[in-house]
Image (spheres, grey):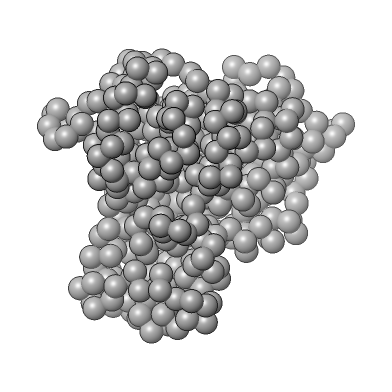
Amino acid sequence: MAGGKLTSIDHSAKRRMGAAVRRHRAFSRTGALEVLFTWAFRHMVYPQIWEDPEVDMEALAITPDCDIVTIASGGCNVLSYLIAAPRSITAVDLNTAHVALNRLKIAAARHLPDWDSFYRFCGKADDHSNIDAYWRHLSPRLDTGSRAYWEGRGAFGLGARRISMFEDNLYRHGLLGRFIGLGHAVARLYGVDPRGILRARSLEEQRRFFTNSIAPLFDKRFIRWAVDNQMALFGLGIPPAQYQALATAGDSMAAVLRHRVERLTCDFSIDDNYFAWQAFGRAYGEAGPCPPYLARQNHDAVRAHADRVTVLNRSFTEHLQGCPDASVDRYILLDAQDWMTDRQLDDLWRQITRTARDNARVIFRTAAEPSLLPGRLDADLLGRWRYEADQSKELTSRDRSAIYGGFHLYVLESGR
């Protein structure tokens, strides 16, 4: 696992984050929102990643000779890919909190005594024994920067050590965790307990709960006003550029979010959707679904291959610039391209195309339904890649997180 001092790279990380997000002058309205989002995104955002790893792994078709580059985010998918035993995974992220979280989860997979202690630490993440496990098994094996993050405190050195999140339900923390908590609080003010969906015993009961309890919330004047405010959606990790991609779909933001919540609530059985458990229950169920890396039957594979992951604090393009030609097989971009300018897209895909081996695969998600590449990416670059339209559409419908408009798979055309 990669080392490196997180504390020594904070300033450059802030500059790179700003370059990734900011498109407008700071004193313009949109520019000011970009500055605020950049500030918010420097802290923990996603304790759990919100892209379905089972969809990813079907599209990626990972084999033991694959070298993978992915955005790290909350780390759930990085560890889940290990089940397929790829040769290597390089996880990059501009957010130093996400880098520290990934390194901690990898250390937990490698060094906690057994599956029970691993699940207690990363799955439940709400037990004081996790703090004892951290000091005994993990802290001595972490790099200096990650230890500094987890053993440090919040703003101005105040508050509890950050590692205390693992005895206070990690999944209630971060921008996303707090946003979900706020959503629950607002729903209760209108007399709705979102946890009620978890008692449903069929898709029909789930649909009934959505129709009678959740859907009416999106007609409330306060909620419609709140979601039309871009800052209110920073908690979902939606920057101004991505907000605009959602808004240009023609529907109000309340209608867009209502549709996404409807998919999450009604399209997949609660018994098989850990994203719904986190959204409505704010935890994984005691005997309910969980990410693949946390499943008991996958623990040996995750533990055996965890040393194949390297976690780096840098951008995707920056990392690829240092990679040899034809050295990568799989690329996972999450929804990062929604943030990018046309020039940034060209720079990224120029490096992807240079470093890709024959039949390399790239997956990404978009806030809106269609792929954003046609008409924006340099035509010569795009012409090197085959868009798997039918499979992309099918996998979009099967993504249990249900928060994206589109899932997209591109495959490098051999010999072109």
Quadrant including the C terminus: top right
Residue 367 in the image: state x and y as whole percent.
Answer: 51, 55
Q: Tell me which residue sits at (39%, 18%) in the image.
A: 141
Taking the image as shown, residue 11 lies to the left or right of residue 371, namely: left
**Who is closer to the viewer here, 338 or 397?**
397
**Who is closer to the viewer here, 114 or 252?**
114
Task: Decide: is 401 above or below 325.
Answer: below
Task: Decide: is 176 above or below 254.
Answer: above
Q: Is residue 240 visible?
A: no
Q: Is residue 116 visible?
A: yes
Residue 181 in the image: state x and y as whole percent.
Answer: 27, 58
Residue 321 in the image: state x and y as whole percent.
Answer: 59, 20
**Who is closer to the viewer here, 100 or 321?**
100
Residue 411, image quadrant: top right
Task: Decide: is 138 above or below 57.
Answer: above
Residue 83, image quadrant: top right
Taking the image as shown, residue 5 lies to the left or right of residue 85, namely: left
Q: Tell me which residue sits at (37%, 39%) in the image.
A: 121
Q: Tell me which residue sits at (55%, 23%) in the image.
A: 307
Q: Tell me which residue sits at (40%, 37%) in the image.
A: 117
Q: Residue furthest right?
A: 415
Residue 193 in the image: state x and y as whole percent.
Answer: 29, 73
Number of numbered discs overlaid on the protein picture: 0
